[in-house]
Image (cartoon, rainbow, N blue to C red):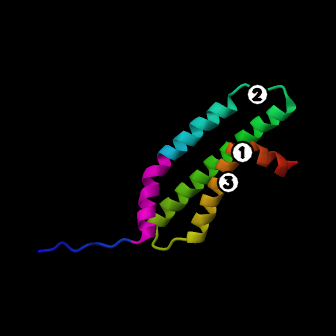
Amino acid sequence: MQAKATSRLPTEIGRDVLNKALPSAIRHALKNYRTIAFAEASEDAKAFQQHQAACKAALAHIEALLKLAGLVESTSKSVASDDTETASLLADAEAAVEAYENPATTDTEEA
């Protein structure tokens, strides 16, 4: 007798993966923010501005992760999910990480 294979939608699999990964990702992002925020800021104006931009990017990353966690939680309770909102949150998270890794791009945008 063969067991019936259950086919799951990619969005269901993705929600499961995110449910498992997000708690540690949020803890990691918070740890990184604390490291950045409590580092000694330079008296040099340019370095200070980069430090502030890094803090801002880290907070944006945390915010995007929390929004994504809320979206995953709410969609797991309901049948319908909004893929465009998920894609937007992921894009925001990637942009925040990019801004943190390359603060020079943030400086030119804010100037």
What crowding class fits label 1: few (fewer than 14 Cα within 10 Å), some (14-19), or many (20 or more)?
A: some
Q: In this picture, which residue range is highlighted in magenta?
A: 9-23
Magenta stretch encompasses residue 105? no
Q: Quadrant of the N terminus?
A: bottom left
What crowding class fits label 3: few (fewer than 14 Cα within 10 Å), some (14-19), or many (20 or more)?
A: some
Residue drawn at (15%, 74%) of the image: 2
Query: Would you name the residue on which mark 2 appears?
Result: 41
Q: Amino acid at mark 1?
A: Asn
Which numbered disc, 3 or 2, marks the residue that appears first in the sequence? 2
The quarter of the displayed image where residue 93 is located: bottom right
- Residue 85 percent coordinates (x, y): 60, 67
> Is there a contact, CB below 8 Å, between mark 3 and mark 2?
no
Magenta stretch encompasses residue 10? yes
The quarter of the displayed image where residue 52 is located: top right
Residue drawn at (67%, 33%) of the image: 36
At mark 2, the secondary structure is loop
Residue drawn at (36%, 71%) of the image: 8
**In the rendered image, the vertical position of residue 58 relative to residue 75, given as above or below:** above
Q: Amino acid at mark 3?
A: Ala
| Relative horizontal placement of residue 110, taking residue 93 as reference (left or right) | right
Q: Give me the C-alpha separation between circle 1 and circle 3.
A: 10 Å
Q: Give me the C-alpha separation between circle 3 and circle 2.
A: 24 Å
Which numbered disc, 1 or 3, marks the residue that appears first in the sequence? 3
- Residue 51 percent coordinates (x, y): 75, 35
Query: Would you name the residue on which mark 3 appears?
Result: 95
- Using the image as rendered, state which of residue 68 and residue 1 is in the foreground: 1
At mark 3, the secondary structure is helix
Query: Would you name the residue on which mark 1 appears?
Result: 102
